[in-house]
Amino acid sequence: MISDLKKQKVIKVALVGNPNSGKSTIFNALTHGHAHVGNWPGVTVEKKEGKLRYKDYEFIVVDLPGTYSLTPYSIDERIARNYILKEKPDVVVCIADSTNLERNLYLLISLLETGANVVLDLNMADLLKEKGIEIDKDILEKTLGIPVVFTVGTKEEGIPELKEAIIEAKERGFSQFKIDYGKDIEEVLSRLEAKISLTNLPYTPRFLAIKLLEEDMEIIEELRKMGYGSLVEEILHEVVDLEKKLGYDLKTKIIERRYSFLKELVKACTKQIASKEEKLTLSDKIDRIVLNRFLGIPIFALIMWITFQLTFTVGGFFAGYIETFFEWLQSLSSTYLQSIGAPTWLSSLLSDGVINGVGSVLVFLPNIMVMFLFLSFLEDVGYMARAAFVMDKIMYAIGLPGRSFIPMILGFGCNVPAIMSTRTIPSERDRLLTILINPFMSCTARLPVYIMFTSIFFKSNQGLVVFSLYLLGILVAVFSAKLFKSTIPSLKGPVSPLVMELPPYRLPTLKGVLIHMWERSSQFLKKAGTIIFAGVVVLWFLASFPFGAEYGSASTLAGKIGKFIAPIFKPAGFPYWQVGVALLFGIIAKEVVVGTFGTLFGGEENFDKVLPQYFTPLSAYAFMVMSLLYIPCIASIGVIYKETGSFKWTAFATIYSLLIGWLLSVLVFQIGRIFI
């Protein structure tokens, strides 16, 4: 076996492509991995690695973030470019949406100019027939000098051919490719290439010469740091002289020449076999309704409302069985421990702490799975990109960047990946703004809190009440962004427009939707087994000591801490020490709020008897508002610090959310008292 592995040749393969070109789907098809795939741009923001064995080769495959070119405007684009230039993979597979060839091939041209060993993957080939397009791959291979394959990533069609093409490219090596930029520019490029050839720089002379003509600041700074400052200045003088002589901007001219080349190439290799009316796809017909200026937003609201309704009706059916299971488990553990003479504290820890605390949270797992099931379907079918497009008009009208709405929608799942997804936003100002407002989006960690309270206080309007909380989160995020943008000098500036390609609608596979649902739901289970478990154990300790005090009483450590915090929440209608402790432990993870109540009140089965002693419907709603808005969980605070690199902004986001949460919960309760 070991000798067989030694015989295998290793090929390092990088997958690159425009956002939403199907890179992650191809990555999964090649490696049998489970990278998250979404039918919208910006799903991959970090590189992922997988392996496969094929014939005598081992492929190490890296899925890079989507990028439109090798000019890095955002963090994810910088990750992709730096990997190609610095790591120098053996083969780069450029995955292109075959139905949008001209725009997708621009990245390919940039890759070929770096000297990379490229394979062109024309993905989504099944949609060509639907759009009435034929592509002659022989012309592409001959013109570009690289292997070209057709694939349908979702059906794993063309994957064996892609593997063969990777091997072919590896064995054949780099093919020279050159675009003619015109006599004047080519003369300058030749001189620059000659000068660069005398250096020891780690890039091909032509790539470097083109980037310097484009005044690529990252490359310029890198060369200066490497001690080639005088060469850079000399070349930049040549750029200025050439622009004066030609009378136009060189960067624009280079882009125009590339697109001119691509236009001719696409014209030569494609053929339209359907009339304009026939080319009107099902996606176009659906979009006429979904993106309608009058219907778009009501349709979005209706879809989200249906999602929440089904979350309760379908999820609630299964939740009862889990509740019964934990009641049985608690009884069984108590009986068993007593029968073997185990100490009382151990029985209390297991029954009152672990089973009651963790069980109180896990009982909501079916609701969370149902919600993720619908959100995964909406993402994979291509609707979420439309939702961002529909909301962009409102966002732009009130002076906010439309691109912020995509991370905001992702925040419905979890704020941590949502904050990381802001890397796709080119403007640092807009990116920071989006990070600061994202924790107000109602992630699924808050869902157990909503379900617990609505099932007791709002039985006939559960879906509507939860929908109002999700809507409130969006409104607070929008209001906060507007406030920050108008009052914080570093966040002021023009609004960057939303430029996003709408993907075609695709009917996702059941397997794909179930995988996505499970990926997210399993995170909830992991938290239950780690953070929530640790939280309820600590809470059990605080609710049990000092010795002699009644478990979960006001005389315990938990009671003393809670009584210190509780007066703060008197104006909001819940001035009880148990509530204060729950909110304090909710900073660890919002699910721990429910776990805390479960530990202090004897399990989830007692909620409907105990909670009405502490809450009215009005104060229950105010508590849910507080849970929605106050301090992000520890994981979110950590990722805010990681993405902003600033203690100041992290502290600001934390303190601001605490204040806005307290203020709005107080307003809800105090104004509500006037009418109720």
Image: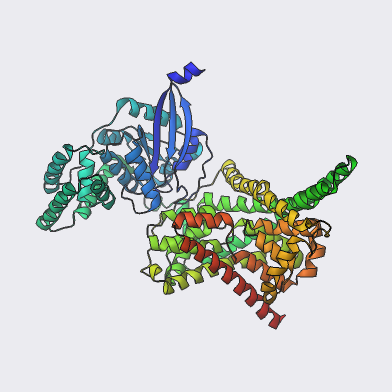
Q: Is residue 164 left or right of residue 257?
A: right
Number of dots carrying numbers: 0
Residue 353 drawn at (x, y percent): 76, 52
Above or below, comparing residue 206 to residue 53 in the picture: below
- Residue at left 51%, top 64%? 651
Residue 660 in view in this figure: yes
Residue 193 drawn at (x, y percent): 16, 40
Query: Furthest residue to the left?
Result: 245
Q: Is residue 446 left or right of residue 646?
A: right
The colour scheme is rainbow
- Residue at left 31%, top 47%? 70
Task: Pick whichever, 217 or 296, lies toward us.
Answer: 217
Task: Pick whichever, 563 or 204, lies toward us.
Answer: 563
Task: Pick whichever, 632 or 99, lies toward us.
Answer: 632
- Residue at left 49%, top 49%? 39
Above or below, comparing residue 326 to residue 609 in the picture: above
Q: Is residue 676 left or right of residue 107?
A: right
